[in-house]
Amino acid sequence: MIADILRSREFILSLILLSALLCVPAVAGRFYVYILSVILVMGLLAMSLNFLVGHGGIYQFHHAAFYGVGAYSAALLITRSALPAWAAFAAGPVMAAVAGLIIGGICVRLNKLYFGMLQISLGSLLWIIVLRWYDLTAGDDGIHGIPMPGFLSTATGIYYFVLAVTAACLAVLYLILKSPFGATLRAIRDNPQRCEAVGINVRRHQLAAIVIATFFAGAAGVLFVVIESSVFPDMLFWVLSLEIFIMCLLGGWFTFYGPMLGAAIMVALRTFVGSTTEYWTLILGVVLILLIFFLPEGLMGLDLRRRIRAHRRHAHPPVPE
């Protein structure tokens, strides 16, 4: 298995990307370093959702709720307890996974759309709690000025920390997807009835996948706290969950790095196009319409080699004997 991973295209692409990203602070300004940090965080969040929807066929419609749980857990532990920041950083993903276990345990009894609708309702309940519990969360004002360790006091230090954590999380996600558990999860996505017939506990595997995905969503929330030194209730709002879905759709549901590409496109549109016009979402809508019609598998779902071979077969059909 390890030898196959080392020879895979994803591993080679990962090494190239990591080498390039390590050099960014030396050649780019502080603004672009910040934008790349945001892309990495949103990419990790989108890839954690894709782990469920694209690879598991689980309709996780309110994934942002667990992103917010991880962020708020870290922020509250730093500002309201004597725990060091590093302990709070570690607790954020764990709390998000616990929330995923509770909500997933309730929702996993239902199938497909009903699962998604109930999950939206419970995720919205978390958002309301954060929004209205002023004594604990400061309500819609959010929590600002969260103190960070000395190493995270500079944009470069923040960038390298975000890059290291994101790379580690993606490596673990990749290994999970290449493991027997990942193969079983894809089998459940394709045919849950047949999996049950051969003795696979479908609900237990789905619940385990939800806990894994929400853990990494919580890790993305902690990284947001590191970048912005603040949290706010909109992190748990359903609109952000919709944006994460769009990121996965743009990049490609059934690919590993597709959601990261989709996150880069979304952040770039919001940052650079949004700075010149307030109608940047109109441009995004046009891109999505074209994508749905011409590239339904997303940008990274486009297999150029397969299309070239198909074109050659069409242009030069085999001569019958």
Image (cartoon, rainbow, N blue to C red):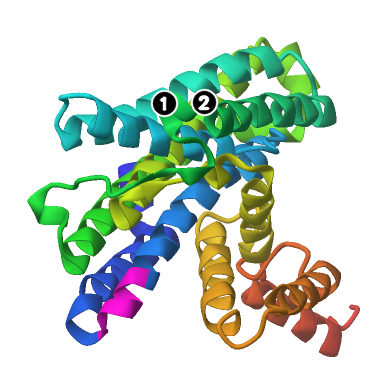
Q: How many marks?
A: 2
* Residue at x 32% of width, y 37% of height: 75
Position of residue 153 measured from the top left corner of the image (x, y, whole percent)? 15, 59
SS state under label 1: helix
Q: Is residue 215 visible?
A: no
- Left/right placement of residue 1 relative to residue 288 reads left
Quarter that holds the N terminus: top left
Task: Say if mark 2 contacts mark 1, CB within 8 Å.
Answer: yes
Q: Quadrant of residue 173?
A: top left
Q: Position of residue 198 (x, y in %)?
A: 70, 13
* Left or right relative to 210: residue 54: right
The residue that label 1 is drawn on is 136
245 vs 260: above or below: above
261 lies above or below 172: below
Do we see residue 211 in this rendering? yes
The numbered disc on residue 133 is 2
Q: Which stretch did the figure color magenta?
A: 28-34
Return the mark for residue 270: none
User: Depth check: 191 or 83 in front?
Assistant: 83
Graded by Cα atoms within 10 Å as few (under 14), some (14 to 19) or many (20 or more), the crowding at tag 1 reads few
Q: Magenta stretch mostly in which secondary structure? A: helix
Q: Amino acid at mark 2?
A: Trp
Q: Which residue appears at 58% of the width and 56% of the height?
A: 255
> Which of 48 and 235 lies nearest the eye of the viewer?
235
The residue closer to the viewer here, 78 or 264, is: 78
Dot 2: what SS?
A: loop
Q: Is residue 144 left or right of residue 260?
A: left
Tell me the CA gap for discs 2 and 1. 6 Å
Mark 2, Cα crowd under 10 Å, few <14 / some 14-19 / many 20+, is few
Asked if residue 319 lies left or right of residue 84, the reply is right
